[in-house]
Amino acid sequence: MATDDKRYDRLKQHEGKGYSGMKVGRSHKWYYDQGEWRERKLSPDEWEISYQTTKRRAARAPEESGAPIGTEYNWLIVSHQRVEKCDANSYETCLEGKKFKVAHKRASNNAWNVSEKAQRKKVIEYLEQMIEELKQADESDALPYSVGEHEHIYGLNLRTKAELLDMAKKYEISGTSKMKREELLDAVKACIEQAGKPQPEETIEQNEQPRPDGHAERKPDGDATNLEAKSKDELYQLASERRISGRSSMSKSQLARALAGRRQRPGTSSRA
């Protein structure tokens, strides 16, 4: 009988196709040694890049699992690199996106599993797939291939359940003990999205004060401490009036936080 360590090499099925290797849905965590990144500017917005380093598993691989030593892979990486200058000589950098396996070469074979022509065709197919996904995405979708005004947490989709639970505490999400990992991820994403949403235009109400230019200035609904004195039903009613999405699944404290942070967008005016 095969051991659990041999599961990596068993033939598996995904969408009707056979494959071997790590099961779809599982994840890796790696540490990269200090590497060497080189780049050359080709045009005002285009650079040629090269990067070389050694990556190491965060956790040791099970004995006799994984690809044999000497196996090679050719990956296509489609990603977005975000950088922030820290000082004259340092930048904080984060990379996020997808990678696609183009080809592999077994340790016992001197040739790649597909020809150069076939590899080129697969690269084109992958890039066309990404272009189509971007074209079909809703304009409000937060994508790793564009820079939005929403709060961005790098590698959020790859966080473990334990890491998501810690984040859920920060956002005061209730009922997490019964949530699966994907449910936790959706709940955290909803809180991040809600925190970054601008206030839509509304009619002038009691807590809107006219400015000297005749436009109405939206005041916040109050701090979370004052709002906590209201009942959950009262907070929910306010959230409905403010069109706060996701309110039906929010706890009382989450409703209070969402209301406290709600302000009208700078430069917009209310309509009579």
Image (spheres, rainbow, N blue to C red):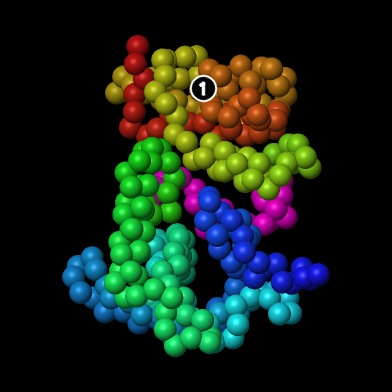
Tell me residue 121's x, y (percent).
31, 64
| 90 to 243, vertically: above or below | below
Q: Total marks drawn? A: 1
Q: Is residue 217 visible?
A: yes
Position above or below: 74 against 99? below
Residue 107, magenta (yes or no): no
Quarter of the picture containing the C terminus is top left
- Give x and y (percent) for residue 56: 60, 79
Image quadrant assignment for residue 270? top left
* Amino acid type, mark 1: Arg
151 lies above or below 87: above
Residue occupying the far top of the picture: 272
The quadrant where residue 76 appears: bottom left
Task: Indicate the position of residue 42 as horizontal and vertical percent values.
Answer: 20, 74
- Above/below status of 184 relative to 254: below
Residue visible at 58% across and 22% down in the picture: 239
Residue at the spot 44% in from the left edge and 64% down from the top edge: 100
Q: Is residue 255 left or right of residue 85?
A: right
156 in magenta: yes
Task: Identify which residue, 87 or 79, lies in the foreground.
Answer: 79
Q: Residue at x 30, y 61 (%)?
A: 124
Mark 1, residues whose alpha carbon is within 10 Å: few (<14), some, or many (≥20)? some
Q: For the magenta stretch, what is the residue range?
A: 147-171
In the rendered image, which residue does mark 1 sit on?
242
Would you say 37 lies left or right of 234 here?
left
Q: Secondary structure at mark 1?
A: loop
Residue in front for this viewpoint, 139 or 210: 139
Residue 216 visible, this orientation:
no
Foreground residue among 72 and 165:
72
